[in-house]
């Protein structure tokens, strides 16, 4: 490395820099500098110099919304840097300097190419003397997250912030993360931590999957047996023994009280996150039927499901069922102030309805041709009730079957076809296909992952997703309201398992949801991501430690030697390796310099690498195969 390059790297600490040299080495370097922000802002213009933020900096606010945001900002500053700012409820005067001004201005932007979602837009200007952040309440909050990302990831008496002018607004209004607590629950504190990370990366919708065959997780005061009975199963599936089934013999259960629900909703609301509850109907209802078997088409008895999968016992389309559901949803809607209520609507076997005299009579009475139309009728009736309470219905793409309810929003998970069909019918759509949005899939090859539900979904593939299908015309594309990643917990029984599956892929999805398609570029994201591993570590998240760069899965070479130059994206990590077929651990050789391997004809050289993060966690073992090939051979 030349001294010239070393100097540039030192100057660029905390930001992402790339350097290109033309001609002689002594010529000035051309450099492209980009702040390590995720998601990437719509517009940013770097200036000269920096602003010094310290405990002496004053924080001015112009109204109650700015004051509320100032409290959250101070909480974060105290948590990360170790100090709070004095708050003054006025505008700064001409003599004031070294201040931060939060101004609530609903129309803060004039520098963005698109004008949608302006309530979430912000303008951030940092000069050597002051920081000014303008936006509506939500936009101002997101500008604060940008500001926080520019600060050190560890306690410091002074934060030197590069001067910059940023104008930013999101691509989509729905930027979602889903969490299934029906199979395995998590604590209130875990959910708050989850919401903190969503907010930090400007995601605004928390889809909370609260009911399942394997457990009912929300207190309903009108129906106490939902949690007395429906929240508890006698055991769970042992590891992957779904078929044939083997149970673990350990009772499992729990639920969230209404007070806990209110606490989480309030915490989310303060961070401009809408909580969308999901109450499954008419299928995935076995936990509810275990509590109230009279709501089924057969007499029961039923038990809370212990195996994973799809079950044939579902809600019967009786007046008793609708009375029950309306009472339940009334309590649900009182707890969740958001616009949407998710009713599931997916994976509904029709076996019981086909054999039910009651269900068949409803079909005859309503002029329904088949059980798919009966499901549509069932959901339309629920939607009418939800709409009467000022809410909107959203469901998985199976709600298209038999005809879509008039005002329903479709969450497209079985690929994009459901979303395309709904958009063409004039319905709003949230794209969430398994191919790019199901975070229970592994992040690499199965043998190199710590936990996974099945399949493979790399962070690069998540990042590559464009939620707007090219087959839609301009009017139809406007119905694509956003994108969402999902985490299902059948095989994720511990909080650290969930964190491993979510991070760092959440950051890629955040940029998919916020940044305009033409502003995305994976190489840039990958380099900016390196600055965020220390933040994930500071938050004590069990994120997946990434594969070292420079370690290809397989290399074919005709050379007699091959050199591997490895780099861990996690600063401060240590890498250990083996070349003799043994599994590396911390007693193995440590990687300190490029590794030169002898390549012998007819033999594969296998390098296995273990990365140890600064917080003492180790990665899954990653491997590379170096294969000798003769000329012209693949």
Image (tube, rainbow, N blue to C red):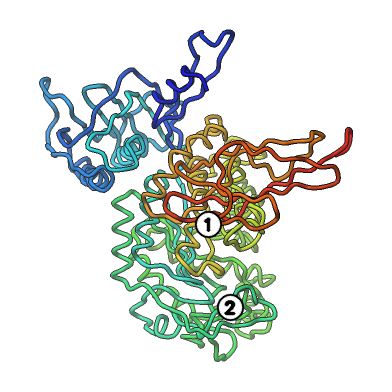
Residue matched to label 2: 237
The answer to whether residue 25 shows anywhere in this view is yes
Q: In which quarter of the image is residue 100?
A: top left
Rendered residue at 17%/33% (across/down): 57
Q: Is mark 1 on a helix, strand or loop?
A: helix
Query: Which residue is denoted by mark 1 in the rendering?
Result: 501
**In this picture, residue 271 sits left or right of residue 577:** left
> Of residues 70 and 417, which is closer to you in this image?
70
Contact, mark 2 vs mark 1 (Cβ under 8 Å): no
Real-space Cα distance between discs 2 and 1?
Answer: 20 Å
Query: Relative to the observer, which residue lies in front, 561 or 514?
Result: 561
Q: Is residue 212 above or below residue 457?
A: below
**Does 8 appear above or below 244?**
above
| Crowd class of label 1 (few under 14; some 14 to 19; many from 20; radius 10 Å) | many
Q: How crowded is mark 2: few (under 14 residues within 10 Å), some or many (20 or more)?
A: many
Q: Which residue is pictured at 56% across the width and 68% down the height?
A: 491
Residue 517 appears in which quarter of the rendering?
top right
């Amino acid at each position: 490395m030349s001294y010239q390059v070393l100097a540039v790297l030192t100057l660029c600490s905390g930001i992402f820099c790339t350097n290109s040299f033309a001609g002689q080495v002594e010529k000035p370097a051309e450099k492209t500098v980009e702040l390590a922000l995720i998601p990437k802002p719509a517009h940013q213009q770097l200036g000269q110099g920096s602003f010094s933020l310290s405990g002496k900096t004053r924080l001015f606010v112009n109204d109650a919304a700015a004051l509320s945001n100032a409290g959250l900002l101070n909480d974060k500053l105290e948590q990360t840097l170790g100090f709070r700012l004095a708050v003054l409820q006025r505008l700064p005067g001409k003599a004031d300097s070294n201040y931060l001004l939060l101004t609530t201005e609903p129309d803060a932007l004039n520098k963005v190419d698109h004008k949608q979602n302006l309530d979430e837009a912000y303008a951030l200007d940092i000069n050597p003397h002051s920081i000014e952040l303008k936006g509506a309440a939500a936009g101002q909050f997101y500008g604060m997250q940008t500001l926080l990302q520019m600060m050190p990831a560890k306690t410091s008496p002074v934060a030197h912030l590069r001067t910059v002018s940023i104008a930013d607004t999101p691509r989509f209004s729905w930027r979602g993360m889903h969490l299934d607590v029906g199979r395995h629950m998590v604590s209130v504190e875990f959910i708050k931590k989850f919401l903190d990370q969503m907010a930090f990366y400007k995601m605004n919708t928390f889809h909370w999957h609260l009911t399942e065959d394997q457990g009912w997780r929300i207190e309903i005061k009108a129906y106490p047996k939902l949690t007395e009975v429906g929240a508890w199963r006698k055991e769970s599936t042992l590891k992957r023994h779904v078929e044939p089934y083997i149970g673990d013999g350990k009772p499992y259960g729990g639920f969230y009280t209404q007070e806990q629900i209110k606490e989480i909703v309030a915490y989310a609301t303060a961070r401009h996150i809408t909580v969308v509850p999901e109450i499954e109907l008419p299928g995935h209802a076995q936990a509810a039927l275990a509590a109230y078997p009279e709501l089924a088409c057969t007499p029961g008895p039923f038990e809370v499901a212990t195996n994973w999968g799809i079950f044939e016992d579902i809600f019967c389309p009786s007046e008793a069922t609708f009375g029950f559901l309306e009472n339940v949803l009334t309590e649900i809607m009182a707890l969740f102030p958001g616009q949407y209520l998710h009713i599931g609507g997916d994976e509904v076997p029709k076996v019981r309805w086909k054999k039910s005299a009651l269900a068949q009579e409803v079909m005859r009475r309503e002029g329904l041709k088949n059980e798919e139309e009966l499901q549509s009728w069932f959901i339309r009736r629920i939607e009418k009730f939800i709409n009467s309470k000022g809410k909107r219905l959203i469901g998985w793409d199976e709600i298209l079957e038999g005809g879509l309810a008039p005002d329903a929003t479709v969450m497209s998970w079985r690929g994009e076809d459901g979303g395309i069909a709904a958009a063409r019918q004039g319905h709003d759509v949230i794209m969430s296909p398994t191919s790019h949005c199901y975070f229970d899939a592994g992040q690499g090859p199965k043998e190199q992952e710590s936990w996974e539900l099945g399949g493979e979904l790399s962070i690069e593939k998540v990042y590559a997703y464009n939620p707007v299908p090219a087959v839609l015309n301009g009017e139809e594309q406007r119905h694509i309201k956003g994108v969402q990643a999902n985490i299902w917990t059948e095989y994720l029984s511990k909080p650290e398992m969930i964190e491993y599956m979510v991070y760092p892929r959440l950051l890629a999805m955040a940029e998919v949801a916020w940044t305009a398609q033409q502003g995305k570029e994976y190489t840039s994201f990958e380099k900016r991501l390196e600055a965020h591993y220390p933040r994930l570590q500071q938050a004590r998240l069990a994120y997946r430690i990434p594969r070292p760069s420079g370690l290809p899965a397989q290399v074919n070479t005709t050379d007699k030697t091959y050199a591997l130059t490895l780099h861990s994206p996690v600063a401060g990590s240590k890498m250990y390796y083996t070349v003799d077929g043994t599994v590396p651990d911390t007693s193995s050789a440590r990687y300190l310099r490029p590794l030169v391997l002898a390549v012998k004809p007819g033999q594969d050289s296998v390098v296995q690498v273990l990365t140890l993060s600064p917080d003492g966690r180790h990665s899954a073992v990653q491997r590379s195969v170096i294969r000798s090939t003769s000329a012209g051979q693949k």
